[in-house]
Image (spheres, grey):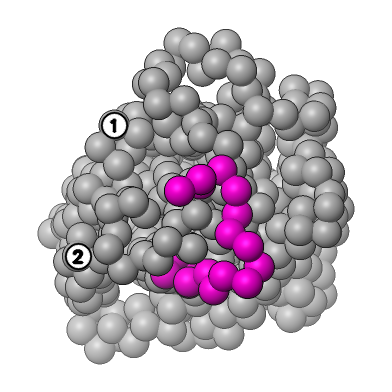
Amino acid sequence: MDVSKAPEPSEKIGRYRWVIVSLLFAAMVINYVDRQTIGLLKADLSKEFGWNETHYADLVFYFQLAYAVAYLAWGRIMDRIGARWGFGVAFAIWQIAHIAHAAAAGFGGFVAARMGLGIGEAGGFPGGIKAVAEWFPKKERAFATGLFNAGTNIGAIVTPLVVPGIVLAFGWQMAFIVTGIAGLVWLPIWLLVYRRPREQKRLGAAELAYIEQDPADPVEKIGWARLLTKKETWAFALGKFLIDPIWWMFLFWLPDFLGKRYGLDLKSFGPPLIAIYLLSDVGSVAGGWMSSTLMKNGASINRARKLTMLVCALLAVPVMFAAKADSVWLAVLIIGVATAAHQGFSANLYTLPSDVFPRAAVGSVVGIGGMLGAFGGMAFSKYIGQVLERIGSYTPIFIVAGSAYLVALLVIHLLTPKMEPVKI
């Protein structure tokens, strides 16, 4: 069978690849419930343990430190052992670490639990992007990435719906135990269902040919040293360095911002956060859909990805003024559009490694970029803690957030003006 070509239009192409996306989506929902729980509990835990702004910033910092180092390792692991076992092991680690938060009796205990969570969660996106690269042709990857990435927003929506009720009824420890045990249901399903396309007996010949329509990749292993000499690696990595800290800020500090600026608490965070992350979901799916649609209509990868990222970057600019909004719902609208813009931008940035690198190198490139993104988040967390301690205003933080995406796009364009396949 010639798999270098897509099947003829008369052949019926199956949809099994979307089952894989649905599993990745579910994993991201669980991932973000685990990650965001502590943000909702910031005020309660600070009161119980006597934390100040710097303590909380340090918790975020240590999570991101573990995440950064592990992200690089997971990228290589995914390339070596594949998404099935790589993602499965990462998932098990982060769920166990999430549950372990319940045993923390002080700041040191929370640091250890957060670092364990960071080590496990660092495998999520390298595994997800690796799976998408294995299961989708290039023209569908941004859309598939946008769909599974939308699970992060659903997780951020589920958290304020579920966690406050558990905390108010049973205490904060049970919030970690209940959500952690419930999430473990996903793991055996993933291990039973996921295989590489050529190893999946349920996959039809037409869908397999459709998945493998792009030119065959070289099969040799590609080391980090070679990847670090490619400007395309740095385009992805520096893009992550610039935009990931903004998403971390939204995720970990939004409840605090809404509480300090508009007087919301554990009982009233829900509707505003749900609205913000629903808008984020729209951005994630729309960003992937836009570039995939442009490509299907004849646009090059370069034009489709960058035009979509430009639209997203411009939509993020108004968040500079979010802290000045007079009403909570105006702030929600401004921030929601910015988080939607981030997700659309991110969905297209995440496809860059699979757009230009062979499949054998995708996990490693994603790992390098994720590590730099987490290092950027660490630095930004320290900056946020200092700003809030010294001046108590989110305005300087939002100004950085509103400008980061245009700067990132400029860097990406300067390093990859044409987005052509890398010659290894």
Residue type at mark 1 is Arg
Mark 1: few/some/many CA within 10 Å (<14, 14-19, 20+): some
Relative depth, front residue between 112 and 352:
352
Extent of the magenta region: 1-18
> Which mark, residue 380?
none
Q: Name the residue under label 1.
A: 80
Which residue is found at the position 63% from the left and 23% from the top?
A: 422
Which residue is found at the position 35% from the left and 33% from the top?
A: 79
The residue sitting at the front extreme is 1
Any magenta on residue 5? yes
Which residue is found at the position 65% from the left and 28% from the top?
A: 421
Marks 2 and 1, how far apart in space?
20 Å
Total tally of numbered discs in the picture: 2
Q: Name the residue under label 2.
A: 192
Any magenta on residue 266? no
Q: Is residue 50 left or right of residue 247?
A: left
Relative depth, front residue between 189 and 384:
189
x and y, in percent, of residue 157 in the image: 50, 76
The residue sitting at the left extreme is 103
Residue type at mark 2 is Leu
Circle 1 sits in a helix, a strand or a loop, which is it?
Answer: helix
Q: Is residue 83 above or below residue 26?
A: above
The quarter of the image holding the C terminus is top right
Say if residue 319 shows up in the picture: no
